[in-house]
């Protein structure tokens, strides 16, 4: 180092316009110096100047440090300075800056002598304005006096002349190094014999110290009269008016000893000069004090203006706030008014609600009393109900017991009657046959079939149809009688009942059906009206039902000769199949002698080939009957015609229009079903129970015939038609006590109970085994029948 300075500087960019403030280790003193500078140079750019003296900067050996080591020290010292001392000072300083609105920087100088460092920095950065403390050793009064601090003195003496320096102590300016002093000093230093003339040093300080002009070269001799002239306000105060201060300091020193005359004259001159300088100093001091006062007054005025502006702004803000608050208050008042109105309304509502509440409470009290009364009544009613139920159950048991008893008696009577009928009625004498047929009078003949002629007649006051089978057969009388008796036990609402036989004449006596056969009705023969489509669908359902029944019989009975002439209609146009099982009563040789080509169309070709009847044979015949019900066409060619019509999507062209407006959807369904039944291959035909029945049975609902077209009412015009579901399938009369059996059909209670108590466990309609013999009263149907009877 050897005295050479290592400088680290920050923020110094404009030394001419910067007031440098030298602060030392003593924080308190540094703060007071800085405070003074900030007060005195408000608005100026301030730079803190601190000379750092590290403790172990130099090498103990040769007093030198490497550059890197030194740099480390500098960095460390700077950090330390920042942290320990200047940090606080700068906080304070920054606080002042913040308030005064000035900026600054700091300079660190690494040097082994503080005062030399300051001089070095002044020179290096051409510092023109410096403030430093001077209270190191001696207590100073507030009067300007000679400096005692060695550092201050050194700086005062050695600082370059272009630098103006203010020395402060405890926040007061105690000394100011005037230009004249420094110039004098410089002049003394630079004095030379040739240059002993008066030199005028003129420093012009313009507004805010922005221009500092050294008017005359300081290199002229210092022992000549030096005139230091500062134009403008040399003080650090702001002043808008320009002042011109001329400081004339005439210093006369004998430069050359040229004799006593001259010495005396010089002494006089010197004393005058000193006197004049003293006056000038005093004047300067007074001027400075005046300036300080004025500066403070201006500062106070500025502060007052600022405060006034702040107050004005505050008052404006308060005015605005007051207005805003007034507006808020007005709104709040409006809201309060609204709330008051709402409150009043709520109060009124509350009053009305309370009144209603009172009314409701009284009502509740009344209702609770009424409720209690009702509860008591309900309890009584329930008790009554329970007792009635009990009575009803007892009565039902009694009634069931009575029915059982009646049935038991009926059975006894029936058994007796059966015995009687088997003996007396079932076995009919030939004389009775002759009598009934008026000796086979042609007028009694109602038809001719392949097995023989059919006569109508009356036997035992009962209207009957008598079928005369071929007299000679392979069956013995007893076989004939036994088989006929078995057939007579097969009863179904849609089967013509075999009432008796005459073994002698091989006659079969059937119940007589008033409306003849289906074929005549489809052909509208014998003045019969065409059957409505609803009747036709119902007849199909009835035939299907009867076929399922006989097929399910044990043993299975195959009709084998199903055709429209064998579908007979009773007085109510209920259809019944006749001739079932007749083939069992004649010799097999006669069975298939069918010369009628029309009749052979209905016969299953498979059956003819194998000479064996199966249930599929009846399915085949049923298909043709179904097609004829739809079309009323002859059996021959009917399959082809319907197929064509279906393929062309025009089934209506083949449907029998005399049956009314067919529901085309159901008609198509039936047509397709019928064609399947008519398949040549039995395997392609549908099963009666699982396929045909589920298809056609649901159509029962649409089969309620139109009153105008009700063929059943032909003989009883004026009488209201009986809904078919009101009629018991067994008694064929309107039910009085309908009961549902396990097969789903509803029967007259006595009829079905009689059926079951007589030992049957099968359905009277389907002949299938019943899951249970339990019966459920059909109250809904009972009520419907009651209503219907009241209307008629
Ligand atoms: N129980 C009856 N009640 C009323 N009419 C009957 C009765 N039985 C048969 N008829 C009438 O007698 C006609 C002849 O019946 P029958 O059964 O003898 O011959 P078919 O049915 O015409 O032919 P097939 O001999 O092939 O059965 C029937 O078409 C029917 O009109």
Image: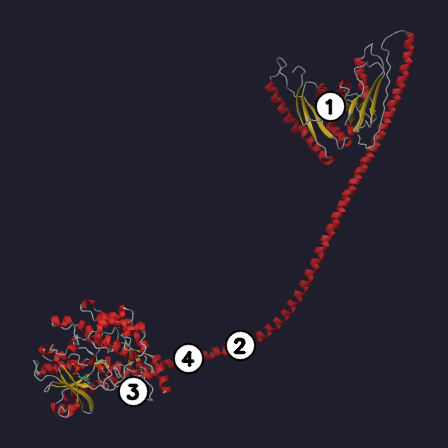
Tell me where residue 443 sits by quadrant: bottom left
Where is residue 540? Give x, y as percent.
Answer: 25, 77
The response on whether ligand 1 sits within 8 Å of label 4 is no
Marks 4 and 3 close (CB-CB < 8 Å): no
Locate the C terminus and report the quarter of the image it occupies: bottom left
Horizontal side of residue 643 vs 236, given as left or right: left
Is the residue marked by circle 4 packed among few (<14), some (14-19), or many (20+) residues within 10 Å?
Answer: few
Marks 2 and 1 close (CB-CB < 8 Å): no
The response on whether ligand 1 sits within 8 Å of label 3 is no
| Residue 639, placed above or below residue 66 | below
Viewer-side label of 3, 2? 3
Render colour scheme: secondary structure
Q: Nearer the viewer, residue 540 or 126?
A: 540
Locate the N terminus and report the quarter of the image it occupies: top right
| Quadrant of the image where one finds ligand 1 | bottom left
Mark-to-mark CA distance, 4 and 3: 54 Å
Where is residue 18? Give x, y as percent.
Answer: 73, 27
- Per the image, label 1 sits on a secondary structure element best described as loop
Horizontal side of residue 105 vs 409, given as left or right: right
- Per the image, label 4 sits on a secondary structure element best described as helix
Q: Which residue is mark 1?
A: 127
Q: Which residue is mark 2?
A: 367
Horizontal side of residue 518 vs 263, given as left or right: left
Earlier-in-chain disc, 4 versus 1: 1
Is the residue marked by circle 3 packed among few (<14), some (14-19), or many (20+) residues within 10 Å?
Answer: some
Q: Nearer the viewer, residue 418 or 43?
A: 43
Instruction: Using the rendered image of the protein, determine whether residue 323 is visible from the camera's viewpoint.
Output: yes
Q: Which residue is mark 4?
A: 383
Is the residue marked by circle 1 packed among few (<14), some (14-19), or many (20+) residues within 10 Å?
Answer: many
- Per the image, label 3 sits on a secondary structure element best described as helix
Where is residue 28? Give x, y as percent.
Answer: 73, 29
| Residue 312, placed above or below residue 345 | above
């Amino acid at each position: 180092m050897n005295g050479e300075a290592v400088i680290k500087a920050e923020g110094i960019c404009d030394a001419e316009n910067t007031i440098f403030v030298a602060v030392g280790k003593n924080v308190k003193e540094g703060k007071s110096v800085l405070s003074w500078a900030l007060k005195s140079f408000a608005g100026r750019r301030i730079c803190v100047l601190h000379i750092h003296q590290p403790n172990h900067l130099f090498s103990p050996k040769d007093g030198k440090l490497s550059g890197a080591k030194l740099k480390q020290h500098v960095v460390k010292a700077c950090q330390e300075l920042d942290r320990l001392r200047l940090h606080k000072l700068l906080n304070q300083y920054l606080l002042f800056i913040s308030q005064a609105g000035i900026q600054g920087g700091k300079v660190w100088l690494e040097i082994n002598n503080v005062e030399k460092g300051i001089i070095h920095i002044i020179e290096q950065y051409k510092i023109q304005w410096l403030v430093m403390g001077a209270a190191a050793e001696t207590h100073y009064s507030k009067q300007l006096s000679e400096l005692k601090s060695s550092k201050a003195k050194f700086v005062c003496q050695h600082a370059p002349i272009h630098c103006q320096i203010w020395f402060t102590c405890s926040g007061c300016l105690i000394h100011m190094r005037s230009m004249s002093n420094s110039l004098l000093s410089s002049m003394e230093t630079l004095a030379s014999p040739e240059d002993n003339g008066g030199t005028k040093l003129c420093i012009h300080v313009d507004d805010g110290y922005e221009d500092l002009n050294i008017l005359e070269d300081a290199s002229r001799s210092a022992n000549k009269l030096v005139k230091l002239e500062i134009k403008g306000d040399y003080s650090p105060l702001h002043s808008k008016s320009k002042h011109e201060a001329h400081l004339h300091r005439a210093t006369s020193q004998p430069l050359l000893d040229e004799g006593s005359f001259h010495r005396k004259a010089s002494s006089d001159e010197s004393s005058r000069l000193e006197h004049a300088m003293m006056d000038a100093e005093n004047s300067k001091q007074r001027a400075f004090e005046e300036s300080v006062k004025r500066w403070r007054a201006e500062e106070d005025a500025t502060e007052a203006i600022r405060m006034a502006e702040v107050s004005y702004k505050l008052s404006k803000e308060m005015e605005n706030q007051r207005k805003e608050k007034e507006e808020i208050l007005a709104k709040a008042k409006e809201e309060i008014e609204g709330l008051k109105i709402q409150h009043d309304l709520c109060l009124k509502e509350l009053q009305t609600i309370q009144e209603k509440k009172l009314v409701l409470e009284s009502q509740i009290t009344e209702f609770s009393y009424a409720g209690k009364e009702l509860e008591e009544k309900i309890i009584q009613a329930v008790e009554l109900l329970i007792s009635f139920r009990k009575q009803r159950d007892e009565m039902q048991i009694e009634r069931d017991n009575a029915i059982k008893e009646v049935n038991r008696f009926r059975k006894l009577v029936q058994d007796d009657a059966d015995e009687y009928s088997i003996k007396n009625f079932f076995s009919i004498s030939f004389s009775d046959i002759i009598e009934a047929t008026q000796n086979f009078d042609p007028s009694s003949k109602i038809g001719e079939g392949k097995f023989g002629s059919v006569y109508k007649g009356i036997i035992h006051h009962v209207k009957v149809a008598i079928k005369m089978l071929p007299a000679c057969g392979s069956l013995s009388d007893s076989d004939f009688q036994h088989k006929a008796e078995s057939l007579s036990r097969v009863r179904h609402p849609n089967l013509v009942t075999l009432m008796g036989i005459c073994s002698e004449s091989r006659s079969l006596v059937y119940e007589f059906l008033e409306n003849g056969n289906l074929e005549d009705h489809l052909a509208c023969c014998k003045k019969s009206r065409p059957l409505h489509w609803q009747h036709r669908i119902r007849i199909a359902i009835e035939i299907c039902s009867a076929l399922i029944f006989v097929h399910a019989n044990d043993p299975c009975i195959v009709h084998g000769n199903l055709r429209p002439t064998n579908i007979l209609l009773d007085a109510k146009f209920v259809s019944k199949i006749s001739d079932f099982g007749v083939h069992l009563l004649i010799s097999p040789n006669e069975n298939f002698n069918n010369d009628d080509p029309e009749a052979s169309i209905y016969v299953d070709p498979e059956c003819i080939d194998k000479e064996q009847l199966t249930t599929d044979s009846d399915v085949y015949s049923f298909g043709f009957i179904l097609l004829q019900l739809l079309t009323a066409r002859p059996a021959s060619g009917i399959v082809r015609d319907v197929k064509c019509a279906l393929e062309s999507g025009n089934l209506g062209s083949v449907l029998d229009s005399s049956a009314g407006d067919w529901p085309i959807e159901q008609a198509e369904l039936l047509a397709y079903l019928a064609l399947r039944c008519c398949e040549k291959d039995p395997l392609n035909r549908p099963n009666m129970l699982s396929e045909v029945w589920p298809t056609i049975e649901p159509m029962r609902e649409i089969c309620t015939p139109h009153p105008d077209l009700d063929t059943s009412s032909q003989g009883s015009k004026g009488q209201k038609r009986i809904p078919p579901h009101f009629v018991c399938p067994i008694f064929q009369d309107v039910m009085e006590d309908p009961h549902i059996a396990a097969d789903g059909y509803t029967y007259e209670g006595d009829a079905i109970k009689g059926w079951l108590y007589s030992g049957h466990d099968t359905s009277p309609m389907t002949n299938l085994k019943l899951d249970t013999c339990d019966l459920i009263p059909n109250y809904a149907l009972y009520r419907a029948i009651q209503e219907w009877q009241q209307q008629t």
